[in-house]
Image (cartoon, helix red, strand yellow):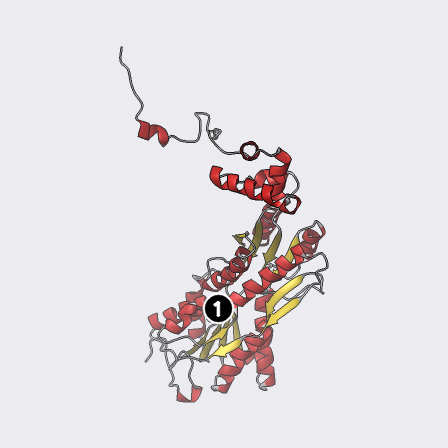
Amino acid sequence: MSSSSTDPSQASAASPFGSDGRRQTVPGRVTIRDVAQQAGVSLGTASNVLNRPERVAADTLARVVEVIDQLGFVRSSAAHQMRGGNSRCFGAVVLDASSTSSTETIRGLEDAVHEQGCAVVVCSTDGSQEREARYLRLLEEQRVQGIVITPATRNVTHLHTLRDRGIVVVLLDRNGSNGELCSVSVDHAGGGELTARHLFDLGHTRIAFINGPLHLAQCQARRRGMRRAARLAGLDIEETIIEYTIDPLTAFNQVEQIVDSFLELEDRPTAVGCVNDQIALTVLRALAERGIRVPRDVSVVGYDDVEFAAMLSPSLTSIRLPKYELGRAAAELLIAETSDPDHRHSDIRFDPELVERHSTSARSRLNSYSPRGV
């Protein structure tokens, strides 16, 4: 008969799951009951220290807090929520959390929320209404304190419904909804106008405009601004602005097809306006691969002015947005509404600005070009 022994190091690294795949109870986990017993107070008093500290005498509060630190107690947010409380989290539903522009906005959100001892749960919709609906449902189930959202559609009736169920909602990068929701936005129509006016001032009268899907209010506004600038310049809008659409905004593979398309036109555009800097970067690469020189052959303007825009060669002319400030302002509105019963809805709007670099040049200094740069 053989015997076996268990290596202590292996035992300490044992899986927390049993043979049936279910998580087992962790031995030694400190409970609020343990805290109460160690501190010599009732369970209700220990609970008040966590949830209603203003009701606890100062000396008792200090004693219980000391025991919490000694025992390493961590409250169960799930249990707190089951008793009717909200979590210590806020939700952020954005179009694409991975984009360089969004990361700066999310950082602004996080910094403001962190100062309140809370956290942010970030979700990306990719402009999909179905994904947005699913994330909103999950965040509501988690009882987040409130939600900052860049809607995937111009219709925000569903967000009013969410608000009516007690969830605070702040619109991010989107105008307010008749004063019924707080909002933080950018004048994107003004941004589109800045793009077109800059190129008109340089002598460009044929512009390829690579926009995002028009069900996004921001893209619709930029288009409106571009067309308004052409009208004010006395130019034929349809002849001046050749429109292309990237859908979804993350479909960078569509850019090369668009570049080939406008290079094949008999009266080719001499400038390109892009919906964001990531699209502009892809355009720069596609033009370089085809022997088209920027800005000598074609001028390119981005949108967002992310950090890498100034590092490109040539450095990218872009429309600068206050990305960090957008996120922080949205979080501050959200925090204010969740904590102040007399809160009044606010609409905060930022203005974009043109940052001129080396990817744009005056049309009068350009030579004619061919797809091979001849």
Q: Quadrant of the N terminus?
A: top left
Towards the viewer: 357 or 372:
357
> In the image, what residue occupies the spot 68% across and 61% down?
181
281, above or below 58, in the image:
below
User: Which of the 4 image quarters holds residue 255?
Assistant: bottom left
* Residue 78 x/y as whole percent: 58, 39
Tag 1: amino acid: Asn
Return the residue nearer the eye: 128 or 342. 342
**Residue 255 in sight from this viewpoint:** yes
Q: Is residue 283 visible?
A: no
Residue 107, percent across and down?
A: 49, 60
Which residue is the extreme one toward the front?
A: 59
Q: Residues within 10 Å of mark 1 (few under 14, many from 20)?
A: many
Where is residue 221 shown, x and y percent of the image?
60, 71
Left or right relative to 332: residue 299: left
User: In the picture provided, is 93 more to the left or to the right than 99?
Assistant: right
Vertical side of 5 occupied by 366: above or below = below
- Residue 261 falls in image quadrant: bottom left
Q: Residue furthest left?
A: 2
Q: Residue 84 appears at what percent x and percent y?
A: 66, 41
Residue drawn at (66%, 60%) of the image? 155
Element class at badge 1:
loop
Of 39 and 7, which appears nearest the observer? 39
- Please name the residue shown 52% across and 75% down the image: 242
Nearest the camera: 101 or 157? 101
Q: Quadrant of the C terminus?
A: bottom left
Residue sitting at x 49%, y 82%: 199
List the residue tagged with mark 1: 276
